[in-house]
Amino acid sequence: MSNIKKAFENGKAFIAFVTCGDPDLETTAAAVKAAVENGADLIELGIPFSDPTAEGPVIQGANLRALKGGITTDKIFPFVKELRREVKIPIVFMTYANVVFSYGTEKFIAASRNIGIDGLILPDLPFEEKEEFQPLCRKYGVDLISLVAPTSENRISMISKEAEGFLYIVSSLGVTGAREQIDTDLVSIVDVVRQNTDIPCAIGFGISTPQQAKKMAEISDGAIVGSGIVR
């Protein structure tokens, strides 16, 4: 059984996103531990990338600060290994396909499993190209987490059927970042997901207030908060 399922066993999951190394790894460790103490069920750790196409200004800024501070993927692996001595809830990496490619895909996924990473989210990886990563993720027991966006439409059922870990539902078009309101018809998207898989789904992108998080958790199995925490 996927370890990620544990995040959804106690009701609605609160998923917290933190960029590694913003502004340094000590701060990242403190932020992760604080999130766990305050009830986070799953942690998403962002591995900084110079061109984070899915991110809005807040997380872009976090990426740049981390990279300026000298953070590298090589420094993140031992950092997570150390963090894992205290943090027992599921942890997933969120980064870009290029980061994994340039590190060496098999080396990256094997190292991720070795330090206790449960899943991998690559927002720039099209569903049709996931075969480049999927077999290696399965080999090492790391869930490759799929994303569904409002534009996925007739592909939602197909993506849902093959989903692993949890399904990341992107709340709105555009990049990450706080939004005043989320107008997407998420209920319909979740309905299609539910018809095609029993894997949990959580909504992210743009959730900036406790009220929004509550609303998103009522529709789905959990809420993902990134920019709100990074800010």
Image (cartoon, grey):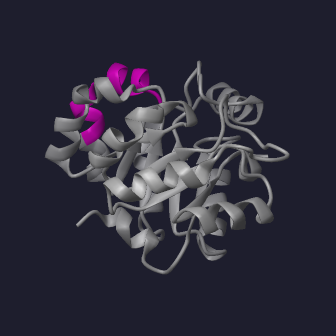
Judging depth in this view, the residue of 111 and 197 nearest the camera is: 197
Residue 230: x and y in percent read: 73, 47
Judging depth in this view, the residue of 146 and 74 nearest the camera is: 146
Residue displayed at 66% across by 59% down: 31
Residue 12 covered by magenta stretch: no
Residue 6 vertical position relative to residue 121 in the rendered view, above or below: below
The residue range painted magenta reads: 96-109
Residue 7 vertical position relative to residue 19 in the rendered view, above or below: below
Whether residue 162 sits left or right of residue 79 in the image: it is left
Residue displayed at 41% across by 34% down: 154
Q: How many marks?
A: 0
Residue 28 vertical position relative to residue 218 in the rendered view, above or below: above
Residue 76: x and y in percent read: 47, 42
Residue 3 vertical position relative to residue 39 in the rendered view, above or below: above
Residue displayed at 65% across by 60% down: 216
Q: Is residue 143 visible?
A: no
Residue 106 covered by magenta stretch: yes
Judging depth in this view, the residue of 184 and 175 nearest the camera is: 184
Whether residue 54 sits left or right of residue 125 in the image: it is right
Q: Quadrant of the N terminus?
A: bottom left
Main SS of the magenta segment?
Answer: helix
Locate residue 35: give its quadrant: bottom right
Residue 70: x and y in percent read: 60, 29
Q: Work out which residue is located at the far bottom of the displayed protein and give it.
A: 10
Whether residue 208 sits left or right of residue 14 in the image: it is right
Judging depth in this view, the residue of 93 and 79 nearest the camera is: 93
Whether residue 134 sits left or right of residue 230 in the image: it is left
Residue displayed at 76% across by 36% down: 58
Residue 158: x and y in percent read: 31, 39
